[in-house]
Amino acid sequence: MTKLVGITVKVRVIGQGAARSIKVPQKTKIADLLDQLGQNRETVVVRLNGKVVAEEERLADGDSVEILLVVTGG
Amino acid sequence: MRCSFCGRRAVYNRRYAGTLLCDRCMVKSVERRFRRAMGEHRLVSPGERVALAVSGGKDSVSCMHLLADYCSRKNCELVAVTVDEGIKGYREKSLPIARENAEMLGVEHFVVGFEQAFGATLDKIVKLAKRKKTEFNPCTYCGVMRRSLLNQAARELGADKLATAHNLDDEVQAIMLNYVRADFSRLYRLGPSYQPREGFVPRIKPLREIPEKEVALYALLKGIKVHLGVCPYAGGIHTEIRDFLNKLETNHPNSKFMILRMFDRMKPHLIEAVPEFEMRKCEMCGEPTSTSICKSCELLQGLELKRGQKTLISAKSLVNMAAS
């Protein structure tokens, strides 16, 4: 039986406090992380290690993820 | 993840079109859509003066950058107008950003305030409404009074068009909201441009076919300074409809565009069904209205407030006043 290996990423939602470490399965997509955090992809822009990326990018151990809440109207 | 057009690293998955875009192609695409809307709907003609409502948020500031460039090429003039509703902790943060961007682009910038125009800030209006237990929420007061003030400001500035930075999400939310409220008179007025009756400055919406997230990406990728704060009064049915539409779009990409396209196809038939009415001048303030008293005056009356002496203030003089 193969053991599932997880990775740890640092996640910060801009304007909502400090960054926190989150453990996710290997090859997790940013879109999956957003789902886990209850953030709708239509309402955010994600920076991976300081660069804006598409939500289909996969995460690697030690990555830094910044989530900018850009849909502010309503 | 590579750009579908040039092979560079993608920054955005445009799921409704099945394409990936890099930073350069993303910026170009937004600029192209803006120019297409301007041209297709003939939103502005050479020689015209355009007043743009600028809050300092991502939509209005991006629109100011796009319109400033467009106007410099098409020989038209752009002026910016900010409505200071008087929302503590919110508007004082976005106003300097609007001013900074206007200065950088060489756009003349004016401010009109609720306090000067209506004798009270929105904060005070909300408190009064609560005390008097009126049926209206903050967005009703703000929306009605802001629209009225923008129209007056645009008229005073001699503008031929009044531009607002409503994006695809805003427009689709408005369509849905008017359906839910069965508000036919507001529904048929939605569109890329609206040619209202006498006394109103024609309104245009150059960002109407650009999704909100793409406007945000445009500002971010261009390094434009914007205010990303949330209005403390945001909430209620507007937010519920916004969240519903975003969930729908996530699960069924292209839904927002489909709602917009369907509405645009229905619109000519809606206009045919609009009952004839006579435009008059409001008995209290002289602003155009279809009833004896305009909606702003009606709301003010309910709160026992009187209109003040509205004055257009140059944003620059506001800075000088604060410094002295």
Image: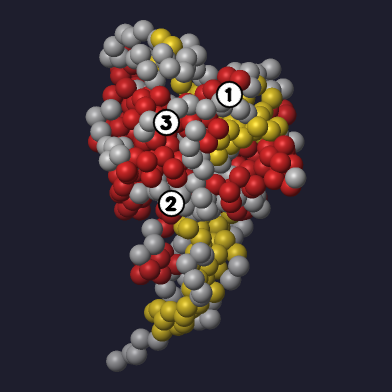
Alpha carbon separation for disc pair 2 and 3: 23 Å
Front residue of this view, candidates B115 and B171 = B115
Residue with the mark numbered 2 = B232
Q: Secondary structure at mark 2?
A: loop
Please name which of the two marks, 2 or 3, marks the residue nearer to the observer: 3
Cβ atoms under marks 1 and 2 closer than 8 Å: no
Q: Is residue A51 at least partly visible in the picture?
A: yes
| Residue B307 badge | none
Q: Position of residue B251 (x, y in %)?
A: 31, 53
Please name which of the two marks, 1 or 2, marks the residue nearer to the observer: 2
Alpha carbon separation for disc pair 1 and 3: 24 Å
Q: Residue at x 24, y 29 (%)?
A: B182
Q: Position of residue B55 (x, y in %)?
A: 56, 41
Give the answer, above or below, for where A28 lies relative to B220: below
Q: Residue at x 69, y 23 (%)?
A: B76
Give the answer, above or below, for where A62 lies relative to B20: below
Residue with the mark numbered 3 = B305
Check the image and tell me how it is coloured: secondary structure
**Residue neighbourhood size for the residue with mark 1, other residues' Cα within 10 Å, grouped as few (<14), some (14–19), many (≥20):** many
* N-term-proximal mark, 1 vs 2: 1
Q: Position of residue B53 (x, y in %)?
A: 56, 33
Residue A56 in the figure: left or right of residue B134: right
Are marks 2 and 3 in one subunit?
yes
Cβ atoms under marks 2 and 3 closer than 8 Å: no
Please state the chain letter of the residue tagged with numbered disc 3 in the rendered image.
B
Residue with the mark numbered 1 = B154
Q: Residue at x 60, y 64 (%)?
A: A51
Indicate the amino acid at tag 3: Leu
